[in-house]
Image (cartoon, grey):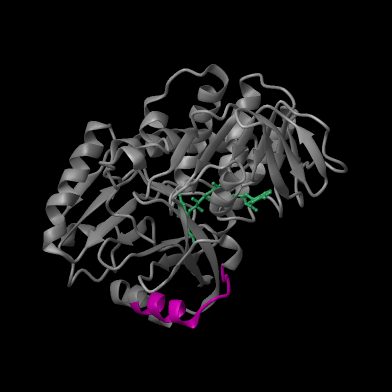
């Protein structure tokens, strides 16, 4: 059982965190570890009901910007210890990530990315197509031009991670309320005063907006404009098979990714350029689409022909919270004391979440500058010259 708070919300709190996904819960736990008392997490639905519970659980360090590489690398170090740290099995498995391409023109960028990752001590190597067969023996390499592989990348079970964090929060005295919607964030023009929920008001000097795809709507309540848009993505799950696939395979050519879960299922998705972006998450259509099932099955069986006899069992849709450079937005805003946001993770908030919570909790409690938080602050979009991450797949 995950211990959750019942009844009325408290009249006051030292910090209120909006959102019971990975970012809200890791931040709450880390703030609690740093000694902040009277922390409340408010979740409008259930734990993991946003993007976190709909994600593929993939965790990779193969990025093209230093910030993402370092956040992923530090998070992997946390995932390696997470089950023991939380006292909760999160099923982290380091089967690696094999990133493939069919385009000769991608090869310089792939090699360059591997070099950058190596300078950060991420053990990525560049592979020729035939070398991929050592990692995925039945992969169809007829169209491949090259790949990169990092054996330290992996997957974890998203619900177990948020349940483990919720349990750890409870141990520290953090109150996690589900089925509790924040309807207003109060401020006096210069500082945060409290939040209004459908179960009462909480007076607080500190609000952390971890509302995932709803973060933009929440930010608007205090006059902060986030450039985030919501994008629909689906996942397909097959029947269970004997273990045959160690890594997550991901193609930067057509955007498919697939891995095998510990239950033996093939789990994967594929991005669709035809998907619209939503400005208001309330309009989001989370029904499952045949178009996705067909696109995924076609791409999967091209790369892995043996999957053609496998039965697909279920699929679901969720939202990416996408920023113009596909990198998160972290920090606060000048002129509004006590307000912070941790959002905009596109398809990689599960893998970057653990250490983002650590860094943000430290930043919020000490005010000490953090180089990654500074370079991912909201004002980068005004300053211009933003550096987008390449190889955003999904
Ligand atoms: C199909 C799909 C596949 C993905 N695959 C991966 C992957 O393999 N690896 C990876 O790293 N990332 C992946 N992602 C992205 C990842 O899921 C997200 O980046 C991450 O989960 C974001 O976590 P979060 O805590 O910021 O937001 P969320 O998990 O969305 O949590 C926000 C929470 O806030 C709550 N909330 C919103 N408004 C309010 C309100 N007014 N009051 C109270 N509560 C509110 C919501 O109910 C929600 O539970 C995927 C996403 C999708 C959709």
**In this rendering, would 131 be left or right of 260?**
left
Q: Is residue 50 above or below residue 62?
A: below
- Describe residue 150's horizontal placement relative to residue 228 as left or right: left
User: Observer-nearest residue: 142 or 59?
Assistant: 59
Is 308 above or below relative to 390? below
The image position of residue 339, as x and y in percent, is 58, 32
Number of numbered discs: 0
Residue 206 place in picture, x, y as percent:
65, 29
In this picture, residue 331 sits left or right of residue 287: left
Residue 189 vs residue 371: left or right?
A: right
Q: Where 106 sits versus 266, above or below?
A: above
Residue 340 visible from this viewpoint? yes
Q: Residue at x 64, y 34 (%)?
A: 207
Residue 147 lies, in percent from the top left, at 21, 56
Magenta stretch: residue 288 in it? yes
The answer to whether any part of residue 266 appears in the image is: no
Residue 160 vs residue 213, the one in the foreground: 213
Q: Give x and y (percent) for residue 153.
A: 37, 46
Point out the residue furthest to the front here. 189
Q: Main secondary structure of the magenta part?
A: helix
Which region of the structure is painted magenta?
284-298
In the picture, which quadrant includes the C terminus?
Answer: bottom left
In terms of image quadrants, where is residue 255? bottom left
Residue at (25, 41) in percent of width and height: 385
Q: Is residue 276 magenta?
A: no
């Amino acid at each position: 059982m995950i211990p959750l708070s019942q009844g009325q919300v408290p009249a006051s709190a030292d910090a209120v965190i909006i959102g019971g996904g990975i970012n809200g819960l890791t931040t709450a736990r880390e703030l609690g570890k740093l000694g902040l008392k009277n922390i409340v997490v408010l979740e409008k639905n259930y734990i993991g009901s946003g993007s976190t519970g709909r994600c593929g659980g993939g965790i990779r360090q193969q990025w093209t910007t230093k910030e993402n590489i370092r956040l992923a690398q530090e998070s992997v170090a946390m995932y390696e210890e997470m089950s023991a740290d939380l006292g909760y099995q999160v099923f982290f498995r380091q089967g690696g990530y094999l990133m493939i391409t069919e385009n000769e023109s991608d090869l310089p960028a792939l090699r360059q990315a591997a070099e950058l990752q190596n300078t950060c001590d991420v053990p990525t190597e560049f592979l020729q197509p035939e070398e991929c067969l050592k990692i995925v023996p039945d992969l169809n390499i007829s169209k491949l031009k090259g790949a990169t592989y990092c054996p330290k990348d992996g997957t974890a079970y998203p619900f177990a991670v948020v349940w483990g964090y919720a349990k750890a929060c409870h141990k520290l005295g953090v109150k996690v309320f589900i089925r509790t919607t924040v309807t207003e964030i109060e401020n006096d023009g210069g500082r945060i005063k409290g939040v209004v929920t459908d179960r009462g008001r909480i007076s607080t000097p500190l609000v952390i907006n971890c509302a995932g795809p709803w973060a933009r709507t929440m930010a608007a309540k205090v006059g902060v404009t986030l450039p985030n848009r919501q994008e629909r993505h689906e996942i397909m799950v097959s029947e269970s098979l004997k273990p045959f696939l160690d890594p997550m395979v991901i193609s930067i050519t057509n955007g498919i990714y697939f891995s095998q879960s510990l239950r033996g299922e093939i789990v994967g998705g594929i991005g669709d350029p035809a998907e619209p972006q939503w400005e208001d998450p309330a309009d989001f259509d989370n029904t499952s689409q045949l178009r996705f099932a067909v696109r995924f099955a076609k791409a999967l069986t091209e790369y892995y022909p043996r999957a053609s006899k496998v039965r697909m069992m279920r699929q679901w849709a969720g939202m990416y919270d996408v920023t113009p450079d596909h990198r998160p937005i972290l920090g606060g805003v000048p002129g509004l004391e006590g307000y912070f946001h941790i959002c905009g993770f596109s398809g990689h908030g599960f893998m970057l979440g653990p250490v983002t919570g650590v860094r943000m909790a430290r930043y919020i409690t000490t005010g000490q500058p953090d180089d990654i938080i500074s370079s991912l602050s909201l004002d980068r979009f005004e300053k211009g010259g933003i550096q987008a991450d390449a190889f955003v797949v999904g």
